[in-house]
Image (spheres, grey):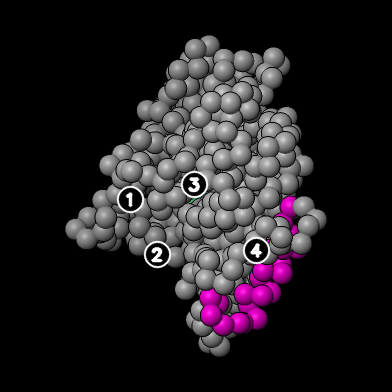
Amino acid sequence: MGTTVKTARPDLPMLLTSLPGPRAQALIERDRQVVSPSYTRTYPLAVARGDGAMVEDLDGNRFLDFNAGIAVVASGHCHPRVVEAIQRQAARLIHMSGTDFYYEEMVALAEALARIAPGDAPRRVSFGNSGAEAIEGSIKLARYATGREKIIAFYGSFHGRTMGALSLTARKAVQRGGFGPLVPGVLHAPYPYCYRCPSGREPGNCAVECVKFIEETLLKTVAPANEVAAIVVEPVQGEGGYVVPPRKFFDELARVAKQNGILLIFDEVQSGMGRTGRMWAAEHFEAVPDILAVAKGIASGMPLGATIARSELMNWPPGAHASTFGGNPVACAAALVTIALLEEELVANAARMGAYLMDRLRDWPRRFPNVGEVRGLGLMIGIELVEDQGTREKAPGLRDKLVEMAFRRGLLVLGAGDCTIRLCPPLVISRDQCDFAVETLEECLRTLTSAG
Ligand code: PLP
């Protein structure tokens, strides 16, 4: 709990007060009175400003942000080019409603997204303000385009909080409890979480049971193929624990979808926009979705979501789907600069720093008895903690303590899944910052487990 001064370097943490400091405490008290208690605040961080991968709290304490605003600020906090684009756009046109009128920024962004989306087919884009809205647009489009009503999603998935997205979400009971009835026609299949294989297989003897379940069980019993509009999948499960499926999962999914006229919707809200060291996680698996849902990192923190689909699929009539604020000019301007930054340098940096982090973390399961698995793509890395490597008993308590202890040492990380630490820093992260994160996590792990 004591004050730890780490370093005076502006790119590394420096703690001046105990945490939370007096200003943070006062804000948290006010927040408690008036802000919805449904928000999950893991530790008492009250932020005043951000710069690159660093954030400063109200008391002047500086933290290294390995959360990136939950995988949002792809180009770091307040990248000067993003700030400049937002300011310039705000001075010219803040809102016009792209649902009813035309403006350059929306068209330019749709062109850019159509160009970078996985696959070669011409694309069209529908804009919203969030990941949940991108999913709502995707499932509405899938139903509309196929004339079918059922949707298959996966256990462990998180797709958002609105009623449609929530109906697909199958992560935590508290997220759904008390909100029913949810949207009908949604079925769930096991996700290829190979460390905890839902079919009890090892990767070597897996016959892609997760897709087999869709083909052999769902489609043959409760969901006749001609009633299934789409399968919705996160190419890397985010909130579920940063779980990376094997390539053959995507091959099989594509086969089953194609054979049955079912659309594939990829939710790249968390895994997209360069985070995995490619523009889209789908590229790692050479997979091409029919519909792509994007948000979070797309506009470096401005609210924006997009549903991207093949042009001939996105062929619904005027009035069928729209959003007043979706594709707001300021958000679009931020997204255009974000895409430029990603293409110029940040996707490559994510690949480079992701590989560097992975090199430093790879042997943790051998070095630390409480680390079950380290997995990930690019800067989307999960460290799963267990009580025992043999039984793989989950260690949520240890994970939570580690997250809290890291905060008290100036490193912001959060959990994902039941017992995984997620690393999702801004894509501007440097080698020194990676070193600081790894060394801090290692120190915390040693202190908490007296291992290694
Ligand atoms: N899809 C995925 C994969 C997500 O991780 C999230 C949010 O964490 C969402 C959708 C929902 O996004 P939003 O909170 O912007 O509605």
Residue nearer the viewer, 422 or 172: 172
Residue 175 position (above or below residue 133): above
Residue nearer the viewer, 2 or 238: 238
**Where residue 39 is drawn, which disc sits there?**
1
Disc on the earlier residue, 1 or 2:
1
Disc on the earlier residue, 3 or 1:
1
Q: Main secondary structure of the magenta part?
A: helix
Say whether residue 212 is left or right of residue 73.
right
Evaluate if marks 2 and 4 touch, with contact meaning CB atoms under 8 Å apart: no
Evaluate if marks 3 and 1 touch, with contact meaning CB atoms under 8 Å apart: no
Report if the beta carbon of the residue with label 3 is closer than 8 angstroms to ligand 1. yes
Disc on the earlier residue, 3 or 4:
3
Disc on the earlier residue, 2 or 4:
2
The residue labelled by disc 4 is 315
**Where residue 48 is drawn, which disc sits there?**
2
Element marked by disc 3:
loop
User: Gap between marks 3 and 1, in whole Å?
Assistant: 17 Å
Span shown in magenta: 98-118
Q: Residue at x 53, y 42 (%)?
A: 151
Place of residue 406 in the rendered image (x, y in percent of width and height, measured from the top left):
44, 40
**Where residue 446 is drawn, which disc sits there?**
none
Task: Find residue 213 and report its image quarter.
Answer: top right
The residue labelled by disc 3 is 159
Element marked by disc 2:
strand
Amino acid type at mark 3: His
Q: Residue at x 74, y 52 (%)?
A: 118
Nearer the viewer's eye, disc 3 or disc 2? 3
Residue 169 appears in the picture as rendered: yes
Amino acid type at mark 4: Asn
